[in-house]
Image (cartoon, rainbow, N blue to C red):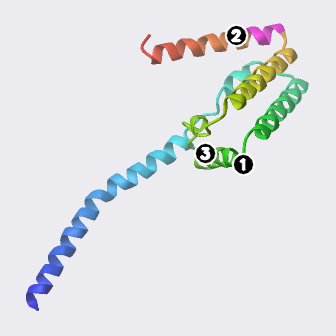
Amino acid sequence: MFRNIKKFIAIACVTVAVGAASLPSLVSAQGSTQNRTENRKPRGGEQWKQLNLTEAQKTEMKAIHERAKSRRDALLTPEQRALITQAKQSGDRRGVKKSLNLTDAQKQQMKAIGEDTKRQVEAILTAEQKAQIAKFRAERMEQRGNRMGM
């Protein structure tokens, strides 16, 4: 019986040691996911502020984007919408587009909605604002090129 207690204590010590050694890596992995989503900046937020949109432009822009969102949602199956909702809640949106497994028809319609939205947005902008957006796009393309090692 004394021998069984020694085995039990030895196994318990090894288990505690392994658990203690792996705990910091588990905590840091969990923390890194939270930090990534908490530190994320809104896409293009500062650039849109620099355009100095009027209140009427902001209102119209919001309406355009809401109409586009409802059109996109109408194209998706309930399962595809659920995947998007899940990705938004988790904060991990990478790869969501690929996981939707859109049909060719859905892809074409999504592209058409995007182009239509872009045309509508550009229609409410002044010439100066359009030039500013073109500058932002050129800068973004340059940054992407630098990240890809070009």
- The residue at the far front in this view is 104
The amino acid pointed to by label 3 is: Ala
Percent coordinates x, y for residue 141 in the rendering: 57, 13
53 lies above or below 130: below
Residue neighbourhood size for the residue with mark 1, other residues' Cα within 10 Å, grouped as few (<14), some (14–19), many (≥20):
few
The amino acid pointed to by label 2 is: Ala
8 lies above or below 63: below
Which label belongs to residue 87? 3
Task: Please report whichever mark, 3 or 1, sits nearer to the chain's N-terminal start.
Answer: 1
Which label belongs to residue 78? 1
- Front tag of 3 and 1: 1
What segment is highlighted magenta in the picture? 127-131
Name the quadrant containing residue 91: top right
Q: Name the residue under label 2.
A: 134
**In this view of the protein, which residue sits in the foreground, 26 or 84?**
84
Task: Please report whichever mark, 2 or 1, sits nearer to the chain's N-terminal start.
Answer: 1
Q: Residue at x 45, y 17 (%)?
A: 148
Residue neighbourhood size for the residue with mark 2, other residues' Cα within 10 Å, grouped as few (<14), some (14–19), many (≥20):
few
**The magenta stretch spans residue 28:** no
Asked which secondary structure carries label 1, the reply is helix
Percent coordinates x, y for residue 34 in the rendering: 51, 48
Q: Distance between the residues labelled 3 and 1?
A: 14 Å
